């Protein structure tokens, strides 16, 4: 992830484009949170 | 430059350096035409934030210690003196004793538990209390969380407990402020 990835999502949530969005915990993590078990051939995921 | 934030202005609290998530958000707001003010805590951070602010052409910087009511009041009063109304606020503030961000959660002290919850959780609510009167036509509040709120991440410890409370406070604040057309959200960012 980069701070620019987070910046893009942040400016969306702050703008009127997100006028219908509130109370939301918006993941900006390249899908990390949806993984139950990594693929057998996936590289190890490092968590800083 | 015109963009989706043209005509909007607001406060970003907690930029520490050019690797901060809040800095990524600040750059995106500026690119989209928004006007920004920054708050910082203490001289050391001011020295790092000021040149970043200047690189975006931002002149408004305010000292703000979220653990001190008087400092918070002074910060928002100073901002309101220049900008009576704002459209957005970014809260990127958290703190815990680093000695307790290693080892086991079970060893958390009462003192650091209270400090971590106050600075990392309650401060967002305290900020909302002060921002709301400055958003008569609505607005958007944003805070930053982490996966450690949902699942156990080694060494994240009491900060994970705090982020869980922060995420829940986002939901309660969203309900409370919805009728005022003020939205409240969090970004849970993955490792940078």
Image (cartoon, helix red, strand yellow):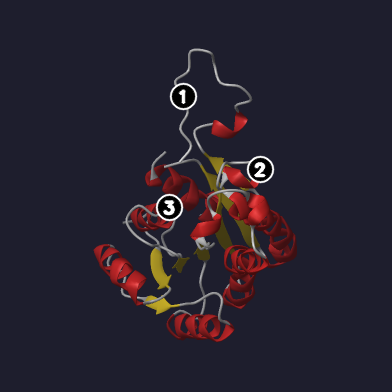
Estimate the spatial distance between the alpha carbons at disc 1 and disc 3, rounded to whole Å.
24 Å
The image quarter containing residue B128 is bottom right
Residue on which the image places disc 2: B150
Chain letter, disc 2 residue: B
Foreground tag (1 vs 2):
1
Crowding at mark 3 (Cα within 10 Å: few <14, some 14-19, many 20+): many
Res. A44 mark: 1
Residue B147 point in image, percent of width and height:
58, 43
How far across and down, in percent of the image, does residue B35 sit?
39, 66
Q: Quadrant of residue B46?
A: bottom left
As drawn, the residue found furthest toward the top would be A41
3 vs 2, front mark:
2
The residue shown at (46%, 52%) is A11
Q: At which x and y percent is residue B149? A: 63, 47
Distance CA(mark 1)–CA(mark 2) = 21 Å
Q: Quadrant of the C terminus of chain B?
A: top left
Distance in Å between CA atoms under marks 3 and 2:
20 Å
Residue at 39% over, 42% down: A2
Query: In the depicted view, which residue is nearer to us: B112 or B15?
Result: B112
SS state under label 1 = loop
Residue B100 spot, x, y in % from top left? 56, 57
Chain identifier of the residue bearing label 3 in the image: B
| Residue B21, numbered circle | 3
């Amino acid at each position: 992830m980069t701070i620019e990835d987070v910046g893009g999502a942040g400016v969306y949530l702050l703008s009127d484009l997100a006028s219908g969005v509130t109370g939301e915990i918006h993941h900006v993590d390249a899908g990390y949170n949806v993984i139950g078990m990594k693929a057998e051939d996936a590289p190890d995921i490092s968590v800083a | 430059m015109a963009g989706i934030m043209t005509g909007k202005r607001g406060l970003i609290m907690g930029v520490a350096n050019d690797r901060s998530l809040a800095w990524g958000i600040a750059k995106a707001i500026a690119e989209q035409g928004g006007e920004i003010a920054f708050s910082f805590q203490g001289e050391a951070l001011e020295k790092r934030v000021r040149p970043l602010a200047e690189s975006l052409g931002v002149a408004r910087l305010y000292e703000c210690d979220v653990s001190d009511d008087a400092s918070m009041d002074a910060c928002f009063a100073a901002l309101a003196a220049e900008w009576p109304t704002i459209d957005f606020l970014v809260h990127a503030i958290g703190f815990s004793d680093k000695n307790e961000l290693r080892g086991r959660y079970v060893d958390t002290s009462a003192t650091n538990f209270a400090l971590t919850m106050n600075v990392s959780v309650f401060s967002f609510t305290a900020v909302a209390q002060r921002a709301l009167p400055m958003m008569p036509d609505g607005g958007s509040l944003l805070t930053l969380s982490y996966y450690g709120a949902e699942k156990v991440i080694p060494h994240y410890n009491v900060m994970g407990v705090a982020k869980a409370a922060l995420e829940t406070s986002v939901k309660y604040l969203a309900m409370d402020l919805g009728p005022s057309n003020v939205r409240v959200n969090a970004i849970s960012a993955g490792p940078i």
